[in-house]
Amino acid sequence: MLQLLCVVGGSAQGLSLTEAAASVGLVPSTALRQLRSLEAAGLLVRGDEDQLYRPGPRLVSLSRTVFVGHSLATAAQPFLDELAACTGESAYLAIEQPRRRAVYVATAPGQHALRHSGWLGRGFASSKTAAGAALDGRVDDDAVVVREGKLEPGITAVSAPVRSPNGIVAAVSLVGPSFRLVGADLASARIRVATAARHLSETLGHQR
C-alpha cells in the first residue's frame, strides 16, 4: 500500500489502475483494493473522467505541512528559544492547515514549573485562537493579537504573523497561564512576540 502511495504520489499526470499495479508488481484486483483504501482515507483521488489516480487532499496537506513546517521550524527555532528565555513562557510556531485549522511545528519550552507544553505537532481548530487570527492578519495596531481561554481554559496566547515575500506563512505564539500574562508582563510579552515575528520575517526575506 505504501508503495502504491509513493508511485501515485510521485506521478506528474496520474496513473491508471493497470499502471499503478504494474509499478509495484501487484495484480490489478489486489491493487484496486489497496487503492480504494487509500482513496477512502483521502490520500488518493480517482478522476471521474479519465479514471486516473492522483494525490488526494489529505496527502497534499500532509506533504505541505511537513515541507513547510520543517523549513520554517529550522529558521524559527533561535527566535523561539530567545522568546522563551526572555519571558519564561512557552513559545510556538504555528502554520495554517485546511478547514480553519493550524498546527504547531516548532516550540521552545517555558522556564516555569507551571507552563504550557505538549502541543508540538498537534493540530487545533484555529478560528477563535490568537494563532488563527495572526495567520489571517487580524491583529491590533502593534501587529499582535491576544486571546484568553480560546486554546484551553485558563491559558492566554499572544501571537503575531510571520511574513515572507509571498505573504503570511506562519505565526509566532507565546502561550502561558492567564494569571501570569497580565498587566506589565502581558505588555512586555506583546512587544517581544512582535519583535520575534518581525526578525523571523526579515530572515525569510520580508521587507517592511
Image (spheres, rainbow, N blue to C red):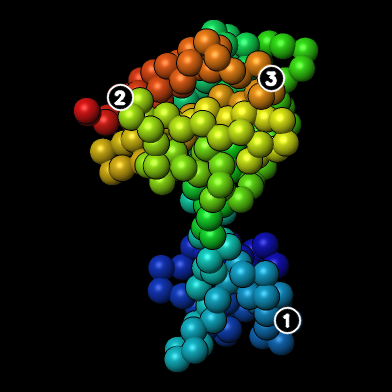
| Residue projecting furthest to the top | 86
Amino acid residing under circle 1: Arg
Which residue is disc 1 drawn over?
Answer: 33
Q: Single out the mark in the foreground, 3 or 2.
A: 3
Amino acid residing under circle 3: Phe
The quadrant of the rendering that contains the C terminus is top left
Q: Is residue 129 above or below residue 4?
A: above
| Residue projecting furthest to the left | 208
Which residue lies at the image location 54% right of the left edge and 60% below the top edge? 99
Whether residue 19 is visible here, answered yes or no, is no
Which residue lies at the image location 40% right of the left edge and 22% below the top edge? 194
Amino acid residing under circle 2: Glu
| Mark 3: few/some/many CA within 10 Å (<14, 14-19, 20+) | few
Query: Is residue 171 left or right of 5 when viewed as pictured?
Result: left
The tag earlier along the polypeptide, 1 or 2, is 1
Image coordinates for residue 65, horizontal then vertical, percent: 53, 47
The quadrant of the rendering that contains the N terminus is bottom right
> How far, Cα to Cα, is label 3 from label 1?
54 Å
Question: Dot 1 lies on which element?
Answer: helix
Image coordinates for residue 87, horizontal then vertical, percent: 57, 11
| Residue projecting furthest to the bottom | 49
The tag earlier along the polypeptide, 3 or 2, is 3
Query: Is residue 70 left or right of 116 when viewed as pictured?
Result: left
The tag earlier along the polypeptide, 3 or 1, is 1
| Mark 1: few/some/many CA within 10 Å (<14, 14-19, 20+) | few
Which residue lies at the image location 38% right of the left edge and 32% below the top edge? 140
